[in-house]
Image: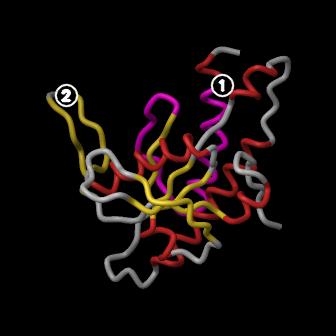
């Protein structure tokens, strides 16, 4: 399999999980993607939306766990991924120049999510969350510590799912039954 085939198989695990739980995939960036789950202005539905985000994360992890890498043990051994969950305000719209524009979102919330994904990799975690997401969701979170974040004045407290810690830091989460 080519790298492109592998990435497409991986994204085929992510995209349906995101869409089925009310999210939107805005952009593919190399081996990553940017997805958003819109929250109404009143924020009364924030815990509900965060719950959908967690369901999408679990579903995508379960789908990736089922991938078959026939004859490619090296890929399976090295194939790890991370999901960073954050909640915050973003600016969105068509951004670009000339005839080339791309609908996307920008802002500190997007940047923080990208930085958190890197921390997930360093910690060998599949799912990490910001303090804002952890406090807004009904997930069972373990405090993983405070980390300096490039481009941010303050360190961010990072959380991981307790169920992932119980299964081993690099275990992929099964979908709840």
x and y, in percent, of residue 41 in the image:
31, 77
Q: Name the front one of labels 2 and 1.
A: 1
Task: Provide the secondary structure element on which disc 1 rests.
Answer: helix
Q: Which residues are magenta?
A: 7-31
Q: Residues within 10 Å of mark 2 (few under 14, many from 20)?
A: few
Snapshot quadrant of residue 10: top right
x and y, in percent, of residue 35 in the image:
46, 50
Considering depth in this image, is 123 or 1 the residue closer to the camera? 123
Residue at the limit of the structure toward the left, as seen here: 98
Q: How many marks?
A: 2
- Above or below: residue 159 compared with residue 73: below
The residue pinned by badge 1 equals 6
- Above or below: residue 28 compared with residue 72: below
- Above or below: residue 155 compared with residue 100: below
Q: Which residue does the image show at 80% across and 26% down from the upper left? A: 69
Snapshot quadrant of residue 51: bottom right
Q: In the rendered view, how is the structure colored?
A: secondary structure
**In the displayed structure image, the side of residue 40 where residue 119 appears, left or right:** right
Q: Quadrant of the C terminus?
A: bottom right
Q: What numbered label is drawn on residue 99?
A: 2
> How far apart in space, not on screen, are marks 2 and 1 (Cα)?
31 Å
Task: Provide the secondary structure element on which disc 2 rests.
Answer: loop
x and y, in percent, of residue 93 in the image:
24, 50
Q: Say whether disc 2 or disc 1 marks the residue closer to the N-terminus.
A: 1
């Amino acid at each position: 399999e080519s790298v492109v085939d592998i990435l497409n198989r991986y994204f085929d695990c992510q995209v349906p999980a995101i869409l089925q739980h009310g999210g939107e995939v805005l952009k593919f960036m190399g081996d990553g993607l940017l997805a958003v789950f819109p929250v109404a202005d009143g924020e009364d539905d924030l815990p509900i939306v965060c719950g959908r985000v967690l369901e999408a994360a679990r579903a995508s992890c379960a789908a990736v766990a089922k991938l078959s890498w026939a004859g490619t043990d090296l890929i399976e051994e090295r194939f790890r991924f991370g999901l960073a969950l954050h909640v915050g305000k973003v600016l969105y719209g068509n951004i670009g120049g000339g005839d080339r524009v791309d609908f996307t979102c920008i802002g500190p919330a997007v940047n923080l999510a990208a930085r958190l994904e890197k921390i997930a990799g360093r910690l060998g975690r599949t799912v990490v969350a910001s303090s804002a997401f952890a406090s807004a969701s009904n997930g069972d979170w373990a405090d993983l510590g405070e980390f300096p974040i490039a481009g941010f004045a303050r360190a961010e407290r990072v959380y991981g799912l307790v169920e992932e810690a119980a299964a081993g830091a690099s275990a992929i989460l099964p979908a709840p039954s």
